[in-house]
Image (tube, helix red, strand yellow):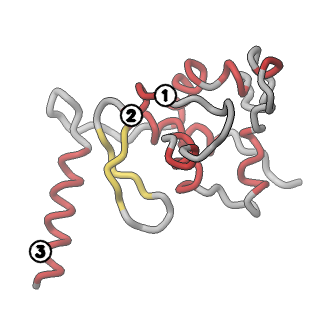
Amino acid sequence: MRAYMMALAGAVALAGCVENESGSADVMPGPQDGQVLFMENCAVCHGEDGKGSGPMARRLQKPPKDLTLIELRHGDRFPRAKIMSIIDGYARSDMTGPGMPEFGALLEGDLVPFDSGDGKLTPTPRKLVALLEYLQTIQQKRK
C-alpha cells in the first residue's frame, strides 16, 4: 500500500509539472521547438547544421563536437541522460579551461516529465527537453 501511495504522489507531482504558467495543460516540446533554441544558443559554435562549423568555432581552443555524430559515437544509441547532463551543465562542472558555456535561460520556465531512457519520469525544464529532442533528430545513421 505504501508503494502505491508513493507512486500516486509521484504521478500527481508529474501531472502538475506539465502545466504552463497559465495553468493549462501543454503538449510535450518537440524537435521544432528545440531547433529554434539550437539556432539561438548553439549554432554560433556548433553551426546551423550541428557539425561544429559555427562562426565562433575557429576562435575556440578546442573545436566544438559534431552533434550529428552523437548516436554513432555511442554505438548507434542516443544517450539521452548523458546528453541532457551536458546540456544542463551537470557533466561540465569539472571541465578545465574554456568549454561549452552554461545557458541559464534554458533552465527557466515550466517543467515537463522527462524520461532519460530508464523509464523514470523526472520534472525537467521544457527548453532542455526541446533541445534534446531536436538533437536526436539530426543524428547521422550508419551506412
Determine contact: label 2, label 1, CB under 8 Å.
yes
Q: Which residue is mark 3?
A: 5
> Alpha-carbon distance for marks 2 and 1?
7 Å
Element on which disc 1 rests: loop
Q: Residues within 10 Å of mark 2 (few under 14, many from 20)?
A: some
On screen, residue 17 versus residue 142, left or right, reads left
> Looking at the rendered structure, which numbered label has been put on residue 107?
2
Q: Amino acid at mark 3?
A: Met
Find residue 99 and report its horizontal and vertical position in percent: 66, 33
In front: 30, or 99?
99
Up-down: is 48 above or below 82? above
Residue to which mark 1 is pinned: 103
Mark 3 or 2, which is nearer the eye? 2
- Crowdedness near tag 1: few (<14), some (14–19) or many (≥20) residues, C-alpha within 10 Å: some
Separation of residues labelled 1 and 3 (CA atoms): 37 Å
Q: Amino acid at mark 1?
A: Phe
